[in-house]
Amino acid sequence: MDELLGEFIAETRETLEPLASEIVAWEIAPDDRARLDSIFRFVHTVKGSCGFLDLPRLERLSHAAEGALAEVREGTRRPDKKLVTGVLLIIDRIGELVEALAAGKIFPDGGDEALILALEPGDEAEPVTIEAAAAPPLPAAGPRAPARSIRLPVELLDRMMAGVSDMVLARNELSRRLRERAGDGNVDTAFERLSTCVAEMREAITRTRMQRIDGLFSALPRMVRDLSSELDKQVVLVVDGGDVELDREMIEMIRDPLTHIVRNAIDHGIEMPADRQRAAKPAAGTLRVDARQSGNQILIEVADDGRGIDDERLVHKAISAGIVTRERAAAMTRAERLELIFAAGLSTADAVTAISGRGVGMDVVRANVERIGGTVEIDTQIGRGCRLTLRVPMTLTIIPALTFSVGDELFAIPRGAIDEIVRASGGSVVVERVGSAPVARIRGERIPVVELGKLLGVATHVDPARAILVVVRASSGERYALSVDSVQDHEELVVKPAAPAIMATGVYAGTTLPDNGRPMLLINPAGVAHVAGVKAPDAAIPAKSDVAEVEAETVPTLLFRACDGATRAIRLGLVERIEDVAAQAVANVGGRLRLSHDGRILPLFGCTAVVPDKYDRVRVLLLGDGSSEVAYAIGEVIDIHDLSPDCLPNAEPGPIAGVMLVGDEQVELVDCFWLFAQAGGSNRSTERPLCLFDSDDPWMRDVLRPIVEQAGYRVGYSGDAGDPDAAVMILSADRPTPELRSTAPVIRLRAAADEGHGAAGSIYRYDRRGLIAALAAAQGGR
Amino acid sequence: MDMLKLIARVADQLIAISADQVESVVEIDAITPVPLAAPHIAGLAALRSRVLTIIDTYAALELGRSPREGLLQAIVVTIDHHLYGLLVDDVVDVAVIAGEPEPLHAGLARGWTHAALGIVEHDGQALLQLDPARIVAGPIPGQILSAA
């Protein structure tokens, strides 16, 4: 509301200024229609805004002026001197009231009635007495509060953004040139300073494009009200997280998908009050719309407590609509069945209503969200409700992507579409040829292979048997392995739409300009599937139904060659990026190696002395846990694997959490929690609240404990003496709540990333942010 | 009306393009190819922080393929908010040419006819004035000559 009020004040001030001259001109020539119109427009706008913002005084004044002016416009009244004066006085009063509003002062009551009366048609001779009553001076009418905001055309911001991008490229070019010639200390220092300024500037300008998501949410109450009364349903809307900021363009892009999801939730999700009462639920349904930031993504959740989605019925519909075969349906997991809601041509509504089910289905919602680099997840329980989670990048233009090479060319693919990356010659992968088409068998699942080089007509440099397979899940549901020469890097790319002639090929999603200054094409996974003729979702047929194997939980893990030559592993979730930094940026200061990077100083782990490559650079992993960042020097990246979360823990806490088996090789797993703890210097107080763990769960003991301790808790186990003092308890979602002597809140963690299997309200156990937030909430609630 | 014109050479033919449609003239050294795109899409190049779609003007005019050796000159135009670089052999001049382009009567090759707005006269020479938007759109589908 404050924001809207601020906008109203800014807008009114802005229109008042030019209006001043209009008013004077109108006074001289009261018959001037154009002037009359612009004054009428002003009071009309003020009146409209006031009604909305609940400013009754301003509303009454503007309404009176509007009425009088309307009569003049209709020709039923002549603009005599009295009327002109009256209108002018009212406009002055509106200005005064707005200024008082802006300064946060109360404008003295009274006088308004006299102003309004003065507008009444009457004897021309008596206008003078109004003056005294009309303008009681503001007590200590201080200087006008200076405007702290201005309005700018978005185009100008775009131009600034483009300018800064140019600057970054020029900086990179300069940096390359400087590296080529032997370093001059002074020049380097100056250059570093410039780099910092450019980075700050870039961030500031990026922020100018950000807008609070409030703007999007403010339309919801009205929509929910209208819809629910139309459908005779009762819905309580709970909105949270309106202060989350995202790119204004992005807000526009998610407006339609969000609207659609909310409509669906009310129309199909929430039941009629009578039905709800029969199901022992409150007559009014609850619709929660929630936004929060997670890394560089924004999560928007729309959850209802309605009837949920019956996946059995969904499957029947899908079979009768010919979307899946009966055999395929029988082999589908629950999550896969729910995914069907995103299939084109499937509506859960039995009858097409005016609200939803008008042909714009969830497939369109998903396609729209994926076009901006986001994802949609669904999660539901029959009878309990349904939750849709939109994950969208914070800005429209920056998409996390994987770059890879095919022949001499580099391409990028949105990271969100990638399931995993494997080597065609890897242990668990076999590539066979069925007819002319290659098919990969990865851990028992057959996945069609699209040889990108062949598809694009680009000569590859790598024998297909040694290629890298990027397993991709396209928005349209196809799953296939993209065969590429080599994987280059994970990068955040600024993606722009490509020219129509390029989009017409269907296989590209846009263009991007990476730091090296050579344009690159972003691959559209759905387009490639279409052009290559990969079909969904029957194409991925489990070769054997090895349920245990398919369901084995894995964590994406990055394998790398460490500086000392050993093979180590690190959980990918913490790796923010891989970068080559200048060796000079690393220095041994304050008793440890530190890296100066993008204007920050990060502790550097992974080596005791820097071993630069021939270009005098060091490859580092930048790790982040959301609040702090550390760097880890490596030799080279080997691969990304999905590995079991288990490892054989080391006895002593240290840089290595333990040893795990990758293929036949023993690999050390880097203990990121230890690294962050070392970097942060955690505050250890004896008064730390107690967090209880399930003593039977080794994962909690070994993996979770450091996180919880870092969040400021001490850890105990259920059954320990300290039970009653516990501030919070963490349990696995599939375990019953034990008998507790305390009333501590319980956080439930589930092993699967997708909610389901009766785990509503739980947190995915690697959702660190979710967990920390829950811990913080538990602590706040005490 | 738009009398200032950019004069360039394409396949030994002098052409004119209305200067108010031209953003700049740049030299291109590296082109990122765009596999599967129409033949007249030569690829992508960077213009500072922006990406240019490079048009093979020869192919667009159904004259074969533009030379691709060394530094290439391209005329930068914006069409429908997208930035294009039209490859030309070289840019000759910018000159004021008065008068509207006159309609063609000579039997031009199809590619030229499609892109030409008409003939303008400069220094006693007849120049074809081309419409950049039609060059960018490329040959009319189904009319591409097999070999020029």
Image (cartoon, rainbow, N blue to C red):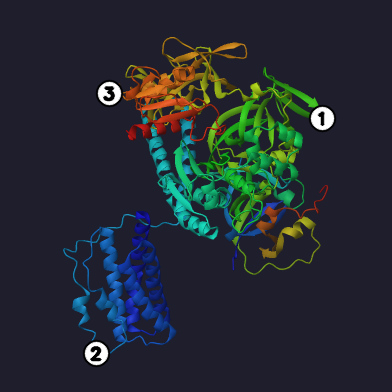
User: Which of the two discs, 3 and 2, labels the residue nearer the N terminus?
Assistant: 2
Q: Chain of mark 3?
A: A
Give the residue drawn at x 48%, y 18%: A697
User: Which of the two discs, 1 and 3, labels the residue nearer the N terminus?
Assistant: 1
- Looking at the rendered image, the quarter that the N terminus of chain B falls into is bottom right
Give the residue drawn at x 53%, y 52%: A274
Q: Residues within 10 Å of mark 2 (few under 14, many from 20)?
A: few
**Residue A634 visible (yes or no):** yes
In percent of width and height, residue B23 lies at: 56, 54
Q: Which mark is residue A373?
A: none
Q: Which mark is residue A125?
A: 2
Between circles 3 and 2, the one closer to the viewer is: 3
Give the residue drawn at x 44%, y 44%: A206
Which amino acid type is marked by label 1?
A: Ser
What residue is pinned by disc 1? A436
Q: Which mark is residue A687?
A: 3
Report whether mark 3 lies on the same chain as mark 2: yes
Quarter of the rendering containing residue A325: top right
- Of residues A278 and A607, the one nearer the viewer is A278
Between circles 1 and 3, the one closer to the viewer is: 3
Q: Is residue A685 left or right of residue A430?
A: left
Q: Residue furthest front?
A: A278
In percent of width and height, residue A638 lies at: 58, 20
**Residue B32 visible (yes or no):** no
Q: Residues within 10 Å of mark 1 (few under 14, many from 20)?
A: few
